[in-house]
């Protein structure tokens, strides 16, 4: 019996054995602890730390899968643990934090919190079923179906970040918060495509700009953390129309399904340049500086004289 249990537990494990195989699950447990700590800090009235714990859980959640693939330590248990941790860290914890801060005292506050928590659980259940769907096209892995759980949690908590930065106002009223949370829940369970981080690549010419942006974000994280969170959420919401357009373009061109995202973008740029009705003006060749200063014409080839 023990041997059978051991063999069944090892089904689906990656190639690694020993303590290294536990590292991704350890990161997942840390994310779970961060989510639960957010509830504790919310009950204590330390709302800044509560938001920070949800953010830390989101960062850890983005790392555990990458670490598992990097170490070849993927396992069925790790996948199930990740889903359960996400349900608590990004479903239960934000719902409780919102209820004890902005929704408490209202008759429908608990209902709004339940709607949000259920939307996260439904989204995670759908995600798990899509993983085993072999009929999906090759490009489907580059997009999420709906807003992923970590982003959905941070979107739902945006009114709390606004309140922490600018105090109580219309943005912290019950009807505004309730409407915002319900809209966040609809985005989470919707079928709107959003870009997966693994499909985003940075061109070499943009590397310096990206490093500067990372430095600015690091400074803002220390001085204006709530403003940084609000800006990041606004940027994420702004990318959704682009993701919808991008997926529609790819879905209509089966010949690009197997191509890498960078190659697909090159094809798209080439098709845009060749589109009829678009005339690109060519700039005339500039004369040399000295010739332009002396008003000299460029030399004519000897055969044309």
Image: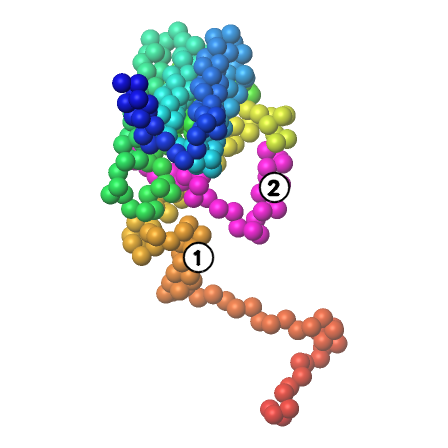
Q: Is 278 colored magenta in this rendering?
A: no
Q: Is 196 colored magenta in this rendering?
A: yes
- Residue drawn at (39%, 34%) of the image: 14
- Residue drawn at (38%, 38%) of the image: 194
Q: Position of residue 237 (x, y in %)?
A: 43, 35
Q: Position of residue 258 (x, y in %)?
A: 34, 52
User: In the rendered view of the protein, which quadrant contains the C terminus?
Assistant: bottom right
Q: Secondary structure at mark 2?
A: helix
Q: Secondary structure at mark 1?
A: helix
Distance Cα–Cα, label 2 vs label 1: 24 Å
Q: Position of residue 55 (x, y in %)?
A: 50, 24
Q: In the image, is 125 to the left or to the right of 290?
A: left
Q: Which residues are magenta?
A: 188-217
- Residue drawn at (45%, 52%) of the image: 262
The vertical placement of 65 against 166, above or below, is below
**Badge 2: how crowded within 10 Å, few (<14), some, or many (20+)?**
few
Return the residue at label 1: 266
Return the residue at label 2: 211
> Does the image show residue 123?
no
Q: Predominant secondary structure in magenta?
A: helix
Residue 264 occupies quadrant: bottom left
Q: Position of residue 118 (x, y in %)?
A: 31, 20
User: In the rendered view of the protein, which quadrant contains the N terminus?
Assistant: top left
Mark 1 or mark 2, which is nearer the start of the sequence? 2
> Does the image show residue 100?
yes
Residue 279 occupies quadrant: bottom left
């Amino acid at each position: 019996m023990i041997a059978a249990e051991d063999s069944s537990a090892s089904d689906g494990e990656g190639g690694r054995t020993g303590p290294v195989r536990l590292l991704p699950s350890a990161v997942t447990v840390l994310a779970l602890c961060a989510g639960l700590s957010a509830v504790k800090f919310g009950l204590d009235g330390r709302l800044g730390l509560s938001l920070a714990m949800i953010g830390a859980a989101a960062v850890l959640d983005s790392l555990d899968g990458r670490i598992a693939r990097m170490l070849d330590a993927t396992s069925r248990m790790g996948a199930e643990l990740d889903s359960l941790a996400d349900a608590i860290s990004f479903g239960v914890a934000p719902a409780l934090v919102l209820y004890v801060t902005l929704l408490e005292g209202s008759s429908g506050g608990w209902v709004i919190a339940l709607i949000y928590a259920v939307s996260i659980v439904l989204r995670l259940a759908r995600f798990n079923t899509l993983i085993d769907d072999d009929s999906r096209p090759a490009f489907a892995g580059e997009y999420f179906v709906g807003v992923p759980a970590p982003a959905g949690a941070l979107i739902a908590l945006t009114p709390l970040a606004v309140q922490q930065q600018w105090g109580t106002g219309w943005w912290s009223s019950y009807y505004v918060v309730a409407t915002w949370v319900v809209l966040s829940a609809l985005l989470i369970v919707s079928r709107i495509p959003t870009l997966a981080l693994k499909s985003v690549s940075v061109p070499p010419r943009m590397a310096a700009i990206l490093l500067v942006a990372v430095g600015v974000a690091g400074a803002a994280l220390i001085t204006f953390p709530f403003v940084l969170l609000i800006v990041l959420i606004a940027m994420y919401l702004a990318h959704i129309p682009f993701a919808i357009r991008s997926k529609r373009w790819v879905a209509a061109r089966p010949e690009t399904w197997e191509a890498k995202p960078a190659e697909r973008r090159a094809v798209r740029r080439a098709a845009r340049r060749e589109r009829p009705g678009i005339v690109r003006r060519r700039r005339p060749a500039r004369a040399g500086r000295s010739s332009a200063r002396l008003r000299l014409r460029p030399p004519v080839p000897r055969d044309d004289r």
